[in-house]
Amino acid sequence: MSVCRKSTLGAVAFALLLPGIAAMPSAATASVSTAPRHARRSTVSLASSSTYVVPGSVATFTATVLPRHAGRVVTVKEVVGGHYVGVASGETNRLGIATFHASFGHVGPLALRAFVTPTPAFDAAISSRVIEDVVHELPLELPPGQTLALGSVSYDTLQFEERLSALGYWLGTPSTTFDDATQQAVYALQKAAGLNPTGVVDGATVAALNDGVLPKPKTTTGSAIDIDLQDDLIMFVVNSKLKYVLNTSTGGGYTYVEKGVTDVATTPPGVYAIQRYVDGWVTDPLGKLYRPRFFFEGFAIHGDTYVPPEAVSHGCARVSIEAINWIWANNLAPIGMQVWVY
């Protein structure tokens, strides 16, 4: 049978806002209150200054307590694993507002609540959560006119690779060297962003990275391998989430002749599953496949020494040698894994 054809808040520091630093407009607010008994009923809302916070930078959180009264003690706590930690306290001004300056030392969603201490005159109150996203770092910037390309060696390359890898574009271990695996990941990002896949990192590519551009797999539940024929991308969906993205080269649409029979180089759309594999090189009249994982007849996801950003194969989904070794090492294409080609 021929192949490639029919037959694939950690640490958080809080401080009262310094004089002269005004509260920023809130991006999210919410409020609830404890039930009053003998004291007057109180409510508190906690407003965030922005949607995103950079680790080490500062954000403003404003607690507004009603009825408005000076001297109410407000405590801000972070929700971590169902518990409240990272306590910071301050007092309201005459407008019933307590403003906090905060910096964070971790990446990911941040859940905060404000707690108001009861007094003989006023009841206690608890705000609903305010959610912030703590982003990894400031947006990546390259000097005007500078690009990164195959062979580049620089700290800028390391920064770019770290962020590209964190986004889900596989390139191996980030380093200061722009190698073949990096070029493959850049192809994938550029194609997902609708850019010309040159493999060279320019301003538009950096902007796509900073915007967090990712392709959208059709698989939305469970785990599967999606092969997007329009953009020539392979996506690994793990537990209903897009985990990794690879550049691929699929059927080029050209005609070819094998053993006197003319055929068209296409990758057949459909829902398949990994059926078998070969741990090594497979030689066929149509070419050589490295460590192929077959998903339909002779069609496979396999390693190749030539994986351009456009479709040139006879029908298989090519990935780089480094990528197929990584797929094998992490068992990302086991027998039975769904492969959705579209």
Image (cartoon, rainbow, N blue to C red):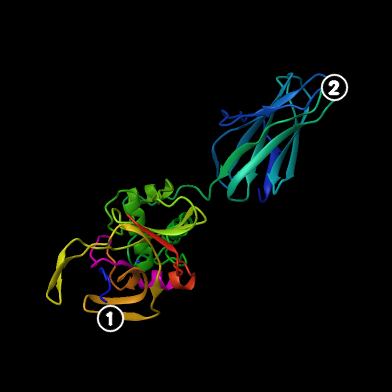
Q: Position of residue 17 (x, y in %)?
A: 67, 33
Q: Nearer the viewer, residue 113 or 311?
A: 311
Label 2 belongs to which residue? 37
Q: Position of residue 101 (x, y in %)?
A: 65, 37
Callout 1 amino acid: Thr
Q: Nearer the viewer, residue 215 or 263?
A: 263
Q: Does residue 179 appear anywhere in the picture?
A: no
Q: Does the magenta portion include 312?
A: yes
Image position of 184 with respect to 94: above or below: below
Q: Quadrant of residue 121?
A: top right
Q: Does the magenta portion include 190?
A: no
Q: Residue at x 49, y 69 (%)?
A: 330
Q: Position of residue 131 (x, y in %)?
A: 60, 39
Cα distance between the residues tagged 2 and 1: 82 Å
Label 1 belongs to which residue? 283
Q: Quadrant of the C terminus?
A: bottom left
Q: Residue at x 16, y 63 (%)?
A: 254
Crowding at dot 1, Cα within 10 Å, few <14 / some 14-19 / many 20+, comes out as few
Q: Secondary structure at mark 2?
A: loop
First to last magenta residue range: 309-326
Q: Residue at x 28, y 60 (%)?
A: 268
Q: Nearer the viewer, residue 70 or 320?
A: 320
Q: Position of residue 277 (x, y in %)?
A: 39, 75
Callout 2 amino acid: Arg
Q: Does residue 12 appear anywhere in the picture?
A: yes
* Residue at far front of view: 7
* Residue at far left of view: 260
Q: Secondary structure at mark 1?
A: strand
Image position of 136 with respect to 92: above or below: below
Q: Is residue 304 left or right of residue 336?
A: left
Of discs 2 and 1, which sits in the foreground?
1
Q: Quadrant of the N terminus?
A: bottom left
